[in-house]
Image (spheres, rainbow, N blue to C red):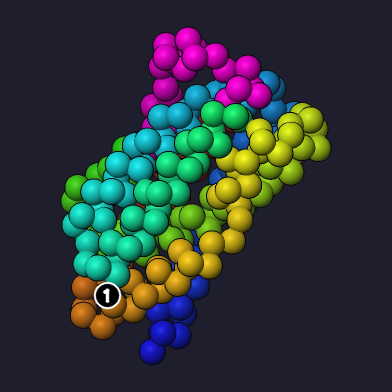
Amino acid sequence: MTATARDLLETTIGALAPDASANPFVPLVERGEAPPQALARLALEQQWVIPSDRRSFEHLARRADPAAAAYFSTLATGEELAARHLTAFARACGVTEERSRTYVPLAGCQAYPAYVSWLALNASPTDTLLALTANFSAWGGYCTRIAAGLRTHYGFEDESCAFFDFFAAPAPDLDEQATAAVQAGLDTGALHTDTAHTYGTLLQRYESMFWATLG
């Protein structure tokens, strides 16, 4: 029975995988061609994204059934840890507290967390879970490539790369929670795969907008 949920997750991740051209920013970091101010802008935008996503995941956990609630609670906790790592990355990029306080974020970068907030308020938590899981697969791959580029071309230490290492690392417990929640949704009829696919498609497009805006 569990294989059904795993198959659905794998199929959805494959179907929603972004085109290679969807992210113009990460290749620049990989080649060492992203200017320092662009890296700083990435840090500053993430300082807005991370707390917004954390609150969205907390709200989804409150709305969800027990299986999905465990998944969203884990995501929210992860955002708290990521926020601590983000501080080191921002500092390595030369971002000061004053600049963080006065920075005006870019609309193209904040469309993604705004849509996650919309999902938290309006969408089925189970459908949202399937869409987010597919999106996280692409995000983790981007983080792996960014971390490698930062170390190779910019001389960033492990502490400064920890934000990206965190999201790039395998998360077997989270994967198990996602599988259990998807299976529960299939068993109860609460999961609507077409709707989840629509949410996932929009998430990928908003994420592409994030990177295009930076790039």
> In this image, 109 relative to 211: left or right?
left
| Residue 137 image position (x, y, % from top left) | 53, 58
> Which residue is painted at 46% across and 55% down in the image?
135
Q: Position of residue 27 (x, y in %)?
A: 69, 40
Q: Which residues are magenta?
A: 90-113
Residue 198 seen in this snapshot:
no
Q: Residue 91: within the magenta?
A: yes
Instruction: Judge whether 132 appears above or below 177 on screen.
Output: above
**Left/right of residue 139 with respect to residue 4 in the rendered view:** right
- Tell me which corner region of the image, top left, top right, bottom left or bottom right, holds residue 94: top right
Percent position of residue 58, x then y: 28, 48
Residue, disc 1: 185
Return the residue nearer the eye: 105 or 18.
105
Q: Is residue 157 visible?
A: yes
Query: At 25% from the left edge and 68% from the top edge, which residue is drawn?
Result: 66
Residue 76 part of the magenta-drawn span: no
Quadrant of image for the C terminus: top right
Residue density around tag 1, few if under 14, some if 14–19, many if 20 or more, within 10 Å: many
Amino acid type, label 1: Gly
Q: In the picture shown, does residue 181 fall above or below 153? A: below
User: What secondary structure predominates along the stretch shown in magenta?
Assistant: helix
Residue 211 point in image, percent of width and height: 54, 37
Q: Secondary structure at mark 1?
A: helix
Image point 54% across, 62% down: which residue?
A: 171
